[in-house]
Amino acid sequence: MYLISLEINPALLIAIVAAVVLLLVAGVVLLLYKVTVTGIVDKVYKRPRPMPQVDRSPKQIERETVIGRGRNWFYANRMQFLNVGVTSFDGTHLAGYYRPSAERGCRNAVILIPGYDEHPSKMAAYARLIMKQMQCSILIIHPRAHLMSEGDIFTYGLMESVDLDAWFDFLKKRVGSNCNIYLMGRSVGALTVLLAAQQEGFSENVAGIIVDSPGETLTELICSWTMAKKKRNVQRYMPGVRRLTEKRYGFDMERCDCSVHAGRIKVPVLIFQGGSDEITKPVKTRHIFDNLRCEKRMVVVDDAGHNECYDKAPSLYEKEIRKFIETCMVRLVKIGRL
């Protein structure tokens, strides 16, 4: 019997062990990256809450803010709002609250669009404000994948901006084919409105656009929201999020950029922006404003955070809304629509 002695080079052994460790570490890092990317995509796009069986009124609503008092007004006058619905381009059923104008033959109508994971009743304060400025019909919509509207995913304005076409048709049937429609959205609702107004074939019935705390891009919204709420920087995950979004849902999230083609918007635009907003930052909103080529005005409330402009400066807010509606009406007279 022969004994074979194997001599192993210590340096080679160390190199092999180091390579294995590096591969394991790289594998763990890649796995964590994929898990994080998948988690972000799931959180961003999937329906935030299951559709309830019935649209119940909340048991209690705070009354310390303008928005809270608006919600109380909405539920106190709930019987004046009809539950209505339309079917969008892809067969998705969308829901809304509709309050016809008290003035017979009134041609003014307003569509209000809440932000992500917001109850539509949060737009009631704005509805009440606009109703004080002019006679109008009010339509507060439930965006797709929110509350009573169908849909499994929310696309931050891409599909939602096209959904508005069905609501335009709804108002033209209810108010008249020559109605004048004003759009108002806040946060992601504002992004939806701005993206819609940039599209070819945008409804000529739209007379003016009001947006509060608009997001410039979806990427920026994800990063700023996560930093503000979770104190976590997810910028390095965005390329993976973009790839997975396109693979899973078939669209490029970079299309959710309302500043690039803002110059296509033809109707007057009024923008409210909180100076202390850490989610939709003033510098990003300024990009949108600078790219607009229509009649425009941007109002910055210095001490307001995200969606806080109306609460922080109600008198200024109401004054600017009134001036904007007057501006829109003057324009309508000039073009022969009023």
Image (cartoon, helix red, strand yellow):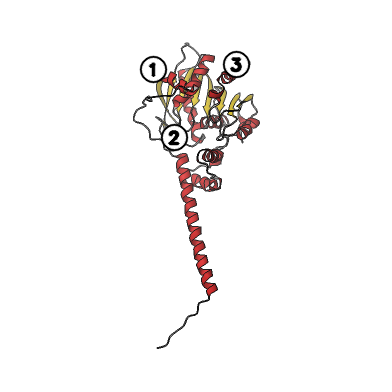
User: What crowding class fits label 1: few (fewer than 14 Cα within 10 Å), some (14-19), or many (20 or more)?
Assistant: few
State if disc 3 and disc 1 touch (CB < 8 Å).
no
Q: Residue at x 56, y 41 (%)?
A: 254
| Horizontal side of residue 287 vs 124, given as left or right | right
Q: Quadrant of the N terminus?
A: bottom left
Please say if 32 is above or below 293: below
Please say if 120 is above or below 21: above
Q: CA distance from mark 3 to mark 2?
A: 37 Å
* Mark 3 or mark 2, whichever is nearer to me: 3
State if disc 2 and disc 3 touch (CB < 8 Å).
no
Q: Nearer the viewer, residue 329 or 172?
A: 329
User: What crowding class fits label 3: few (fewer than 14 Cα within 10 Å), some (14-19), or many (20 or more)?
Assistant: some
Q: Amino acid at mark 1?
A: Met
| Horizontal side of residue 193 vs 79, given as left or right | right
Residue 178: percent from left, percent from top = 53, 18
* Residue to which mark 2 is pinned: 90
Q: Nearer the viewer, residue 158 or 126?
A: 126
Q: Amino acid at mark 3?
A: Glu
Residue 331: percent from left, percent from top = 62, 18
Q: Residue at x 46, y 45 (%)?
A: 39
Q: Residue at x 45, y 41 (%)?
A: 43
In primary-sequence order, the first of circles 1 and 3 is: 1
Q: CA distance from mark 2 to mark 1?
A: 31 Å
Residue 338: percent from left, percent from top = 58, 14
Residue 54 seen anywhere in this rendered image of the structure: yes
Residue 38: percent from left, percent from top = 46, 47
What SS does tag 3 mark?
A: helix
Please say if 156 is above or below 78: below
State if disc 1 and disc 2 touch (CB < 8 Å).
no
* Residue to which mark 1 is pinned: 79
* Residue to which mark 3 is pinned: 326
